[in-house]
Amino acid sequence: MATRGRGGMDRRTLVKGAAALGASGLAGRRFGGRARAQDAVALEFWDMVWGPPEYIDTGGRLVTQFNEEHPGIAAEYRSTPWANWYQTFTTAIGAGTAPDVSTGAAYQSVQFYDQGAVAAVDDIVAEWESSGTLADFLPGTVERLRFDDHQIALPWAIDIRVLYYRRDLLEEAGVEAPTTWEEFAAAAEAVSGDERYGYVVSGGENGGVHHMLSFFANNAGGLFTPERQLNLMDERNVEALQFFADLVAAGAVHPASAGYSGDDALKAFAQGDAAMILSNPGLEGRLPEIADQIGLMAPLSGPHGDKGTVSWVNNVMLYEQSEAKEEAKQFLMWWSDHLLPLWTEGRTTQIPVRQSIADDPFFDDNENLRFIIENWVPVGQGTGSKAEGIFPVLNEVEGEGVLQTLAQDLLQGRAVAESMQKAEERLAQIVG
Amino acid sequence: MGVRADALGRRSDRVVASGSGGGRRRLDPLPYALFVPSLALILLINLYPFASGFVYSLRDGSLLKAGDFVGLANYAALWRMPDVRYALQFSALFAVCNVIGSYVVGLGLALLLNKDVPGRGFFRVALLLPWIIPSIVSIVSWRWMIADQNGLFNQALGLVGLGPIYFLGSGDTAIFSVIMIKIWRSFPFMMVSCLAALQSIDRDLYEAAEIDGAGRWQSFRDITLPQIAGISVVLWILMTIWSVNDFETPWLLTQGGPSNATENLIVLAYKYTFTRNDVGLGSAIAFLSMLILMVLALVLLRRQEADER
């Protein structure tokens, strides 16, 4: 996206321009940062919406700061909504109007890398290794974004699922916050009754999938073998889903869960219709009216003593279509070094991947976030566990809907073995 | 008249033949030239997406890669796919229930509004609201009303000691809910169309029937129904097309769930294309639904031709 000297416009440029216009229509707010200098190299940075409106403003300010510190580069910040994100990016890539750099969901980089749209950033990691910067990243976060011996993106944050509970409801039922599966089931059943339930899941969206992946990890199971072979029928997975099915059969899971969206499930939790929920960090901030009643559990011990939950390392990546890759890499490194305001000012609820950010006094005031960093993050595992790293099929496995259907089957009381068998067949088709 | 005759005469000179050299016809290019922009626009808007969609259905591509040419393999695969078979069944159930439900409700209300009842004007407007309200607003509102025990419906059921019913929490109740909400969205169109048809019936027919001693039911059966039969068939076909084609009702309410119970062909095509990244199969499903709709459209055209004759 270098500067252009020609005033005319050929047909190809016109088509690209039209596509860019369309893509920018799909994308959200833009920040120019400052007017582009005539001779500056232009960069497009598309940042997903990772927090409240303050996040977008903070992201825009950071880009402005970058531009001021790098007079030869004019980066433009564009906040990109999650709605139809995949179509937004594929349309842009297909039309040749991809950004130079973007943040993205856990498997976005590997999926686009596999299709030749994202460039490897091995040299950045090599540079970080020699400068010692690499040691600042939380263990496993950089490695998680390797594929086929290449670093295909840089980590910037962790998304994770943790268990919350309602203090008042557990207290009323006379139970403590659970620390094991057994206690979790006992607490859920103790709370349930009179149109109140122990646990709620947003089965109509991805909440059911996240529950399953979290409990697979919690029981040392996983969707894949270390060799990336599909392994849904692993006995630890079967055990985890049987535990879930037993909760449903005991009437301890909210019966509307199969059709619930994420907001529906949160509403049920907020209204006191359900006592426990698996959610992303920062729940107390999203439900301020009951913040003092929200408790954060420690990772549960599974029946064999294992601990775990599902987590994703969110990426920031470089696109092959960029005509200014060196400048884009400069931007990537700068961005990674200047992320702190996204938490302190932007109020994102993601978990930082850099120890220097996690150690900032800002997090001392946030007891729950500190607890998650210290207790939940170390036991987090990706969708592809037990296989290392990420690989392209994970996006389809998680997003295709087969796991969502499996969760919905179980929430409707269908047999575990039969439901899993059906899902296994479909997953085998996807994995190929 | 003279001017008109002159103009017509000159036009006739241009179109038919000229000169004395042997009766060769010379076509006037002007009408064809005027026709070209419209034709080009239609081709661009309709034919290009149609053709490119068909080409996609013959490839195994993704949203980023065109993929290889696979011939009719995607279409052959459709018949082996249980989710496609189920989506076909659900689309048929959804369409049949919606056509019957919306027609019965629409005709019933049209019969009432065709009489001189107090507040008729108000009711005519009020009953159009489900048709007027944007689907995103109405369907999301319905979702709030039926999704959980605190929704309006369960509150109302609670007042009479019933429920709660988690309408979107199981396959059967979700299917029922999706169909009912579609009927609610569709009946105003049926009502307005039936009302227009009812108002075009000659009053003398009813007076003659009354003189002959016919009761209300007999008049309805022997006069009203035959008189509105033509428009009714058109309405049924149109509503079938709109039902098979409906994306927003199942998507906004259930996203096709739970356990794919409310997944119709259009939702399935969307899922294959945009969440499963299989543009070939998604396009093939979309074409399958288009073929069904084309058959229905042909029936509609034939019916209109028969009516005109």
Image (cartoon, coloured by chain):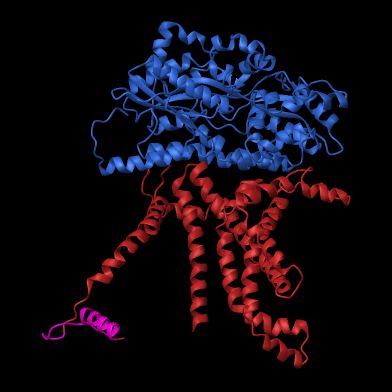
The relative height of residue A247 versus residue B93 in the rendered view (above or below) is above
Give me the chain that's blue.
A
Q: Position of residue A301 (x, y in %)?
A: 72, 19
- Magenta part mainly helix, strand or loop? helix
Q: Position of residue B215 (x, y in %)?
A: 78, 85
Where residue A7 appears, x then y in whole percent?
A: 24, 36
Colour in which chain B is drawn: red
The image quarter in which residue A171 lies: top right
Q: Is residue A20 above or below residue B181?
A: above
Residue B19 is inside the magenta segment: yes
Quick check: B15 above or below A143?
below
Is residue A209 toward the left or the right of residue A66 in the image? right
Q: Is A117 or A268 nearer to us in this picture? A: A268
Q: Quadrant of the N terminus of chain A?
A: top left
Look at the image and give the residue range highlighted in magenta: B2-23
Residue A177 among those drawn in magenta: no
Q: Position of residue B164 (x, y in %)?
A: 81, 46
Nearer to me, A117 or A88 = A88
The answer to whether one can see residue A226 in this image is no
From this viewpoint, is residue A163 visible? yes
